[in-house]
Amino acid sequence: MDENNLKTKKLINFGPSGRAIAQPMDNSLLDNIFEHLTMERFANVQYFSIYLWFQERDLNGFASYFLRESQGEMEHAQKFADYLIARGQTVKLSEIPAPIQNWDSIEHLISYSFNMEADLTSSLQQLYAISERSSDTRTNVFLDPIVEAQTKSEDEIANILGKVKFASNQPSAILLIDTDLMKK
């Protein structure tokens, strides 16, 4: 190997996956991204379970809404996995718990969904703070549109929760909300 090749080889850093990387990732940030990836995967499965619950009760508007949410969470998980690969990391998938499949009421189910969205938002905020502390601008740029979309999702669920709470479990009001969700 000539001297130029040796210099080039020494100047390039490689990540755990063997890909060339321009900037290593902070271990705390990496661990938290893995945790967030697990949260996104769990939300995907949980929302699919909620989709099934509404589908079984012929509430097709709610069902279609939660099927879209399930698909959206899987897209988020894929974005995080792709980002990790682009940063030279090996994606580590953790086991996810079984989703909840039985609910006492629609209000309880929507409240649970809101809390899940709020937890995802908090996790993203934590990732953002860690990436700022470690001067990882690449991660901040990656997170910007995800944080914006997450805030929108949290707002949508809050809106649905407000309507369901106001409906006080009245079947006719729930059917109106279901019809409204079907239009979206």
Image: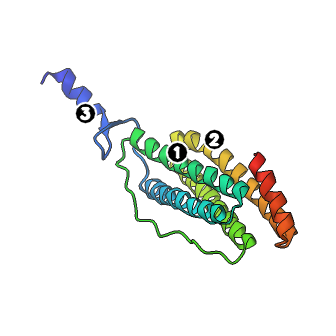
> Upstream in the sequence, badge 3 or badge 1?
3
Quarter placement of the N terminus: top left
Find the residue positioned furthest to the left.
1
What amino acid is found at the position of numbered circle 3 in the picture?
Lys
What type is the residue that disc 1 sits on? Ser
Inter-mark Cα distance, 2 to 3: 35 Å
Tag 2 near tag 3, CB within 8 Å: no
**Which residue lies under the disc numbered 1?**
135
Eyeballing the image, is 8 above or below 38?
A: above
Find out whether the residues at labels 1 and 2 contact each other: C-beta distance under 8 Å: no
Give whichever of discs 2 and 3 has the lower sequence position: 3
Q: In this view of the protein, which residue sits in the foreground, 4 or 178?
A: 178
According to the picture, the residue beneath numbered tag 2 turns out to be 145
Indicate the secondary structure of the residue bearing disc 1: loop
Residue under pointer 3: 10
Please provide percent x and percent y for residue 63: 66, 57
| Other residues around mark 1 within 10 Å, as few (<14) / some (14–19) / many (≥20) | few
Name the residue rendered at 67%, 62% in the picture.
118
Report which quarter residue 46 is drawn in.
bottom right
